[in-house]
Amino acid sequence: MRVFITGATGTIGTAILRKLVADGHDVTALTRSQSARQSVMAAGATPYAGDLRVPEDWARHAVTHEAIIHTATTFDKDMAEVDGRLVAALLEKVKKVRHRPRLLYTGGCWLYGETGEASADEDHPFNPVPAFAWMVQHAGQLLASPDFSTAVIHPALVYHAAGGVLESFMSAATCGQPIEIWGTLDARWPLIHRQDLADVYGALLVRCDLIGHFNAVAEEGVPVQQIADFIAHYSGSEHPHFVVPMDALITRHGAAALGPTLKQGMTAQKLQRLLGWTPKQLDYRASDLFIPRKN
C-alpha cells in the first residue's frame, strides 16, 4: 500500500515506520527538519516536507495515498488546536479524491481515565484526562466520516530499548538518584512494547473492514511502585523512590501530568478476537530494556 505517516521519527512512529517498510509498503513520512528527513530516508521511506501546524500545505498530498497513519502531536498547549486543524484539513481534502483511504488515528489509554482495579475494554465509556479530551472528539469526527475507513488505536503506555515511558525511571536509578513517582503509589500503568504496538498498526492497516476503537496493550495494569522497585533493584540503586505531590506536578508540567497518576487497566481482547494478535513482550521486566548486567 501507499502509506502516508505523521510522527515517523517519534517514539511510536519510529517502530511503525520500520514495520511498514519491512512489510513492503511504499511509505511517505511528514518531516519538518533535516535530521528527520535523513532518518526517514535511512529507514527506506520517502520524506515529505511539511509542518504539523500547517496541515493545509500537505493534507492534499496525504489523502492521495491509500492509507494515512497519524501518530504525531505537539504536546504543547496548542496541541488540541493543531490536531483540530489537521483533522479538518483531512476531512476537507479527502472529498476531492475518488478512493476511500484507510486512516489509523492514535488515541491513548488516558482517554479512559481512572478504572481502579478494573480494566477498560472498547465498550468502556471515555473519561479522558482533560488535557487530552480533544482526542475523543477528533476521533469521533473521523469515525463519522464516510470518506475514510477509520480505526482509532489506543496504545497503552509505550516502552522500548531506549526507555520510552520507563526512561525517566531508568535514568534516575542509573545515576543513583531516587525515582520520582507522580502523584500516588496507587497508580497502575497498562504497558506495551513499541514493537508489539507497531505490529498492531501493521495488522490493522490492511484490514480496512475493521473500523472503530481498538485497545493495544500487553500488560493490563502494572503497579507503578512495582515498576520503580524493580528498576531500582536492577540498577543497583540504594535510593528509594519518592512521590511528587499533584500540585507540584501541575505547576511543573501542566494538566497533562494527571495521566501517569491514574490507577488504570486496559484490555486488548478485541484485537485478539478479530486479528488473532498476541503481544510478544508480555513482561516489561524481560524486555530489551533490561540487558543482564555482567558480574
Image (cartoon, grey):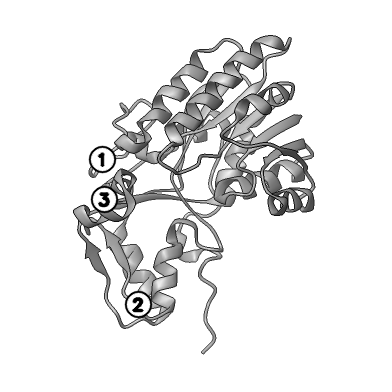
- The amino acid type, in three-letter code, at marker 1 is Glu
| Residue 228 image offset from top left, x and y in percent | 33, 67
Sequence order check: which comes first, mark 2 or mark 1? 1
Reading the image, the residue beneath label 3 is: 250
Other residues around mark 3 within 10 Å, as few (<14) / some (14–19) / many (≥20): few
- C-alpha span from label 1 to label 3: 18 Å
- State if disc 1 and disc 2 touch (CB < 8 Å): no
Other residues around mark 2 within 10 Å, as few (<14) / some (14–19) / many (≥20): some
- Asked whether residue 135 is in view, the answer is yes
| Residue 229 image offset from top left, x and y in percent | 32, 70
Reading the image, the residue beneath label 1 is: 114
- The amino acid type, in three-letter code, at marker 2 is Gln
- Asked whether residue 149 is in view, the answer is no
**Element type where label 3 sits in the image:** helix
* Residue 59 horizontal side relative to residue 231, left or right: right
Sequence order check: which comes first, mark 1 or mark 3? 1
* Residue 150 horizontal side relative to residue 101, left or right: left
Is 92 drawn above or below residue 25 in the view shown?
above
Reading the image, the residue beneath label 2 is: 177
Residue beneath the point at 48% across and 25% down: 84
- C-alpha span from label 2 to label 3: 22 Å
| Residue 140 image offset from top left, x and y in percent | 44, 19
